[in-house]
Amino acid sequence: MFFYGLISARVARIRCAPLASRHHEALPQKRVTSRILSALVTALFIGCAAVTFQAPGPATAPPVPGHPTNLLLALDGISYQQFLQARQRGMLRGFRPPVPLISTFPSLTSTAFSSMVQPVGYPPSPGYENRHYDWGRNKVGGGIPYLHFPWHDYFEIDPNTLSHKTLGYCWPRRLARADFREVERQALELDRGFITAYLSNTDAFAHLHGKSGALEVLRLLGEMVPKLKAAYQHRYKRPLYVTVLTDHGQSVVKQRPVTGLKRHLRLGGFVPGSSIKNDRSVVVVPFGYVSAGMLFLRHRFQRKLSRWLVRLDGIDLCTYRRDDGVIVIIGRNHREALIEARGTADGLELRYNDLQGDPLEYGEIRERLRKRGCLGPDGFAEAREWLEESAFASYPDALFRLYDAFHNKAIENTATVIFSTATGRAYGHPITRALSWLRAGKLDSTHGGLDSDGSLGAVITDNPVMPLPMAFRFDEILPFAERYGKPPDAKNWPAAPPETENYLATGASAQ
Ligand SMILES: [Zn+2]
């Protein structure tokens, strides 16, 4: 990830002609023992897991008399679409309208949070998720014993433990309700200017119960927030603003497994295993049941592997980084494109070069940028312009996310090839898949891929002074939330508009 220092200032900046509409648009719709056992293993492998590395500690700030306190609450795995649906049902009316938060690729919990906290000074995570391949040790590690990933340290309130997570897969509704009560209880004890909190069991609820689970989470959120705000105001004599963010979306369809991956690799002349012994060795680290997969191999055969793997039923596209830094996308039916990047004084510029068949379906997006005057004669456009033009596309902000997937420093052990699965298809650990079938609710949704449903998390706030762009990218949100959430320094706390007091008094939407 590049150019973090420019991010918050660039969120609202427009170099070329503005989009026809920058309003928020609805996306197209797209028994105890066995239970505990299944939940334990599901939790271990699901990919969104509680997980210790030294880090700066929680992002807090002391209280300043007369200035509101801001609570930044991260809910795992609730999609932008689900926030919109909740609003349509009359929930969360005390908040301003939700804004999409575009996740990383792969759109996985630890990958997303590691990349979110990096711009505010937190160290990288060793892998995409807890169970990961380590290039230096040439082996797969993590999972059990569990590693503590540094991004957790950003959050002062984090009732998430492995046992808590496991129980969350047994009784997700009960645990989600208990988690909200815990946030309310702990936040009320914190006389701070800025408070951070993270709840993970919301993702379990969404995985297991799909749309109804997510809506129940948001209903609980809508119940908790007004109570907490009133209690905080009463105790500390200053208002509490709440900003909620989520790390990725959910593809809310029943998932069919991508099967036979290792057999397919062998048929292609590769040797799947747990370490790299020669040019044909491929390490695959399945975990959870998600819509992406990471493969580790020497670069010599990364192109051959990508072209072969995309022929497997259920794979949508494969992507890898060439030695010159260019990102290659291999789609089905011989579709292929390149993503090229260059740094400028203003930031990062990206070019989409569809060599054959436009695998990302970005031809029209590029044309719209050209018509707005945002595309240079050589085909490069600013990364932020690509984001704004593609935030609601089938693959939101794909150019930057794919570039970042192989160039960022938030994940230490980067994969050689990453694949994204087709809609309704998921890849993961066979145990997770088998145990998901034992669950009465099954896994009704997942995430991880480049697709819109799985990629769009959300930001929703009742902070009346926080400007809201049409969409946030994962590396923008925390510097932005801190800038408008922490008390002065006057320079990072703009004067509240006059309607602030009325807004607080009525609980009405600020927009
Ligand atoms: Zn997550």
Image (cartoon, rainbow, N blue to C red):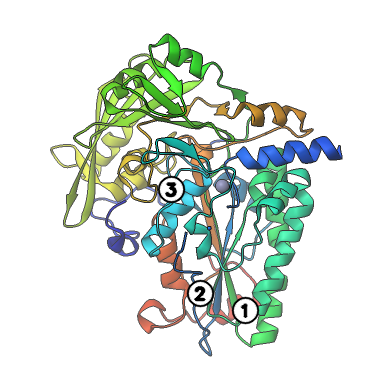
Name the residue tied to disc 2. 60
Residue 89 seen in the current view: no
- Does the Cβ of the disc 1 residue fall within 8 Å of ligand 1? no
Instruction: Please tell me which residue is depicted at 24% across the width and 42% down the height of the picture.
Output: 350
Please state which of residues 70 and 197 is positioned toward the viewer in this rendering: 197
The disc, 1 or 3, on the residue closer to the chain's N-terminal end is 3
Quarter assignment of residue 386: top left
1 and 3 marks in contact (CB < 8 Å): no
Above or below, 394 against 467 in this view is above
Q: CA distance from mark 2 to mark 3?
A: 25 Å
Q: Quadrant of residue 446?
A: top right
Residue at the image point whose x is 54% and y is 36% from the top:
28
In the picture of the structure, the residue carrying the numbered disc 3 is 126
Q: Which residue is mark 1?
A: 190
Where residue 92 sits in the image (x, y, percent)?
65, 60
Discs 1, 2 touching: Cβ within 8 Å: yes
**Residue 220 seen by the camera:** yes
**Residue 242's x, y, as percent?**
58, 68
Q: Position of residue 433 (x, y in %)?
A: 65, 28
Amino acid under disc 3: Pro
As drawn, is 500 to the left or to the right of 342?
A: right
Secondary element under disc 1, as helix, strand or loop, is loop
